[in-house]
């Protein structure tokens, strides 16, 4: 449906007439129209909403949150006129910072309307679910005073315990996994494979499947049914179901819940007719931002809440007579979480298609954030990537709703003349788009530094800039390389990853203490070695081989094979930790470990705070067991994080500051100047890489095969793919998401987008000194061909 057709359904004149008839406040009509007329056409379509379902597909920089805030304030004003009931609007978004941002904007618009700053609530999805569940604890089963919230990860002790229990209960299947494709029975290899299965393969499979299944309402029994439809030699989905079952039993026995349990608990409440009507009668509509990041159960929760209470549970697919008062705003082209969360852009695409059929789809395709050359580059990249994907999967036949392509066919358009946004589509700085091909990563830093110095030399108080990296290790290397340059030129350098690494202090300290307590445990030894590798205190190496025989690694006998220098360095450091355990009092251990891990000043302060907290908790039980128990509780419940006093968005986008941040964290932010170095094919789009230590199982990973099989079943495919097909589908999902991540990164820039792909770069950034020839990201040469005037001639620069 065209945007103009939608707008016509609620014309400005009818809005004017309706408000003049009903408004008890004489100036409310003019104030609402003033807010509406200050919006772009796409934003106005949100403001014109009065009832029913509405999908808004928005491009980057279109002003989703601004439009939603204005639409929310106008909807509250209409409700204020229509009814004296205490119904309110529920606004849902993805993160706490986004929730705080949109709440402030709604209050500002309500103030413009001279209305009380009330009548609405803003939640994250999990915050909304917890709110519903806690109000009906008898139905939800959540007694909040008795349960602990955790965020399970692959390394979480509950996941690890579930793995150990599953192995104990299924020795035959475990032995089959241990044999892999072939096995000669050699004892050292058997121990190595045990380590890989217990600490990597099975925890990763459990973590992936638990998230995928719980967020989609899939039971262990259904997973086992699906497993019967597949013929893989390891019965991957059956193994996954068993791990899932062990995990759930553990959680129930300890009164722990995870974030998926919150959604399920809220749905249990809404499954009760009386409770559902109570909740629905308090809500006149639901607005959802970042809808492309919702999982199936989260969407179901919002649809039930947004349904007409008189018509019962209307959570089924939309119909032309749907009673859903639900506005969902998102951009499937900015879906960048689906390879590590259960979110999948297919669900928001389906909602858009369903709304389109009933003429309730609008598009916000005008964006004023970026200069025109950046918009052209982003549009070109989107189209080029889709064409490449179609050529491989669909014989080049384009269809607007083709789900095999990474992007929805949606073009960013510059705003029209007279747009209400200040400085919309600003003039470019330099060429606006600059494409570099440095000799190597050191040359990259040199070129990037020169450009940064020039940009900040003019007026740093009005300059915002960021370097977007694909992974944290690149950011850490860049921060070290740029620190002296920034100090010399008085440029503030803010490494977001360095701040985030402070949150890992409790987990790293716990890993080393557990090793000190039980040095002969292969699991604890490997966890400690991983922490030391992460801190770059020992070289990257095969940790499974070291951990499989702890005593031989730590104290090799005279008949043991000679250890390499890298192994000796790791062993010496581990022995020093064990000596400290014997020689130091307990209360000094955490501080000693913090110094050993080479923490910076901020991390040392975090470690001191941690030590103080732990020592207070074990004051009456000063023992290693008490310390480990206290630390485990802190790590599991994630209650140690300090409350941030400054808004994260402001912290990342300050003027006068050069921010180093990952592409994922950059979503939703923007800067005047954005630098995208190290654009190489091995990272974007990357490829699924089966770690050498787990290749005995085959040329695939169990977790990704399981994810692809579960999603195929959820998406209604006629058959569940076998291992080979599932692995190919997983690859496609990965490639699509990496390209969407690049698109998000490109569209963060306002006036200058600086991109580079060095001829030589590391194969892995854990060893940045090992440079080799690297192929650029496929989009990069295509951009150079399309925009030759933006290619920087380095030969001319050096003259």
Image (cartoon, grey):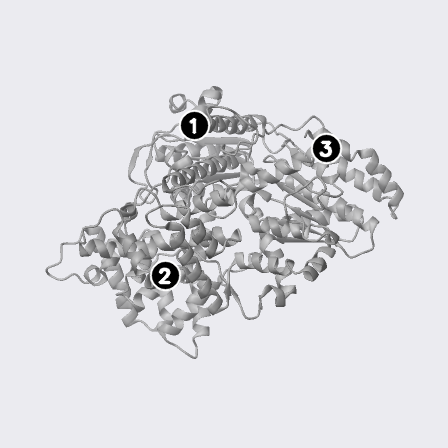
x, y percent for residue 319:
68, 41
Q: Residue at x 54, y 40 (%)?
A: 346
Which dot marks residue 639? Answer: none
Give 540 or 495, whichever is nearer the viewer.
540
Q: Which residue is mark 1?
A: 392
Give 431 or 779, whichever is nearer the viewer.
779
Name above or below for residue 447 compared with residue 517: above
Name above or below for residue 305 compared with residue 356: below
Q: Residue at x 55, y 45 (%)?
A: 293
Considering the numbered disc 3 on the image, is that residue within a helix, a strand or a loop?
Answer: helix
| Tag 2 and tag 1, C-beta contact below 8 Å | no
Label 2 Cα neighbours within 10 Å, binned few <14 / some 14-19 / many ≥20: many
Q: Quadrant of the C terminus?
A: top left
Task: Quote the CA–CA distance across marks 1 and 3.
Answer: 36 Å
Q: Which residue is mark 2?
A: 166
Q: Quadrant of the N terminus?
A: top right
Name above or below for residue 624 compared with residue 393: below
Mark 3 or mark 1, which is nearer the start of the sequence? Answer: 3
- Relative to 89, 579 lies left or right: left
x, y percent for residue 385:
47, 29
Mark 3 or mark 2, which is nearer the start of the sequence? Answer: 3
x, y percent for residue 624:
35, 73
Give 472 or 180, whichever is nearer the viewer.
180
Q: Which residue is mark 3?
A: 6
Name above or below for residue 696 compared with residue 750: below
| Tag 1 and tag 3, C-beta contact below 8 Å | no
x, y percent for residue 521:
28, 64
Considering the numbered disc 1 on the image, is that residue within a helix, a strand or a loop?
Answer: helix
Which residue is at the far left?
A: 559
């Amino acid at each position: 449906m065209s945007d103009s057709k939608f707008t016509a359904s609620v014309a400005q004149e009818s809005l004017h007439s309706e408000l003049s008839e009903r408004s008890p406040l004489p100036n409310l009509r003019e104030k609402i129209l003033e807010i509406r007329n200050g919006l772009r056409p796409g934003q106005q379509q949100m403001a014109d909403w009065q009832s029913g379902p509405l999908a808004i597909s928005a491009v980057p920089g279109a002003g989703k949150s601004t439009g939603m805030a204005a639409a929310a304030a106008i909807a509250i004003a209409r409700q204020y006129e229509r009814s004296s009931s205490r119904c309110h609007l529920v606004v849902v978004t993805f993160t706490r910072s986004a929730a705080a941002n949109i709440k402030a904007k709604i209050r500002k618009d309500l103030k413009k309307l001279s209305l009380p700053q009330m009548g609405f609530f803003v939640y994250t999805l999990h915050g909304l679910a917890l709110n519903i569940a806690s109000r009906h604890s008898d139905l939800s089963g959540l007694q909040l005073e008795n349960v602990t919230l955790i965020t399970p990860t692959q390394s979480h002790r509950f996941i690890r315990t579930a793995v150990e229990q599953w192995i104990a209960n299924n020795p035959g299947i475990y032995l089959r996994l241990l044999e892999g494709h072939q096995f000669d029975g050699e004892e050292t290899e058997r121990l190595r494979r045990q380590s890989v299965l217990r600490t990597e393969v099975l925890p990763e499979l459990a973590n992936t499947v638990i998230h995928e299944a719980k967020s989609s309402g899939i039971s262990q029994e259904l997973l086992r049914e699906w497993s019967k439809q597949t013929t893989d030699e390891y019965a991957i989905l059956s193994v996954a179901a068993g791990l899932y079952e062990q995990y759930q039993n553990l959680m129930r026995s300890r009164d722990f819940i995870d974030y998926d349990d919150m959604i399920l608990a809220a749905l249990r409440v809404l499954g009760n007719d009386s409770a559902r009507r109570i909740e629905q009668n308090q809500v006149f509509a639901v607005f959802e931002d970042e809808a492309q990041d919702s999982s199936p159960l989260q969407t179901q929760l919002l649809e039930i809440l947004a349904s007409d209470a008189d018509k019962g549970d209307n959570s089924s697919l939309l119909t032309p007579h749907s009673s859903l008062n639900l506005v969902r705003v998102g951009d499937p082209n900015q879906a960048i979480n689906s390879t590590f969360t259960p979110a999948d852009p297919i669900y928001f695409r389906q909602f858009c298609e369903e709304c389109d059929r009933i003429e309730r789809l609008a598009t916000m395709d005008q964006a004023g954030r970026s200069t025109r050359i950046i918009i052209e580059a982003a549009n070109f990249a989107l189209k080029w990537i889709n064409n490449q994907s179609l050529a491989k999967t669909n014989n080049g036949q384009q269809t607007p709703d083709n789900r095999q392509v990474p992007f929805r066919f949606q073009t960013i358009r510059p705003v029209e003349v007279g747009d209400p946004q200040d400085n919309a589509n600003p003039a470019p700085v330099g060429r606006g788009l600059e494409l570099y091909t440095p000799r190597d990563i050191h040359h990259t830093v040199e070129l990037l530094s020169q450009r940064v110095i020039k940009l900040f030399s003019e007026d740093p108080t009005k300059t915002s800039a960021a370097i977007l990296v694909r992974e944290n290790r690149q950011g850490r290397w860049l921060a070290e390389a740029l620190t002296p340059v920034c100090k010399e030129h008085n440029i503030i350098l803010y490494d977001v990853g360095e701040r985030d690494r402070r949150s890992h202090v409790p987990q790293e300290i716990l890993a080393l203490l557990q090793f000190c307590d039980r040095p002969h445990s292969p699991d604890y030894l490997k966890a400690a070695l991983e922490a030391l590798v992460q801190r770059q205190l020992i070289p990257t190496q095969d940790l499974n081989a070291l951990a499989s025989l702890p005593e031989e690694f730590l104290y090799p006998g005279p008949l043991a094979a000679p250890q390499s220098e890298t192994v000796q360095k790791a062993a010496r450091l581990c022995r020093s930790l064990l000596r400290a355990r014997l020689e130091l009092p307990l209360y000094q251990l955490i501080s000693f470990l913090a110094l050993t891990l080479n923490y910076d000043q901020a991390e040392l302060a975090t470690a001191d705070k941690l030590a103080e907290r732990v020592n207070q908790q074990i004051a009456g039980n000063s023992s290693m067991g008490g310390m480990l128990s206290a630390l485990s509780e802190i790590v599991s419940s994630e209650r140690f994080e300090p409350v941030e006093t400054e808004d994260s968005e402001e912290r990342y986008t300050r003027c006068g500051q050069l921010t180093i941040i990952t592409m994922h964290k950059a979503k939703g932010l923007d800067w005047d100047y954005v630098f995208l170095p190290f654009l190489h094919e091995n990272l974007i789009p990357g490829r699924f890489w089966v770690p050498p230590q787990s290749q005995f199982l085959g040329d695939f990973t169990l977790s990704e095969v399981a994810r692809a099989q579960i999603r195929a079943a959820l998406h209604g495919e006629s058959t569940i793919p076998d291992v080979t097909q599932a692995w190919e589908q997983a690859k496609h999902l990965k490639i699509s998401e990496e390209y969407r991540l690049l698109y998000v990164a490109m569209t963060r820039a306002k006036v200058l987008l600086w991109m580079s792909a060095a001829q030589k770069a590391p194969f892995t950034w854990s060893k940045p000194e090992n440079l080799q020839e690297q192929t650029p990201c496929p989009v990069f040469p295509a951009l150079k061909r399309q925009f030759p005037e933006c290619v920087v001639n380095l030969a001319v620069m050096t003259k």
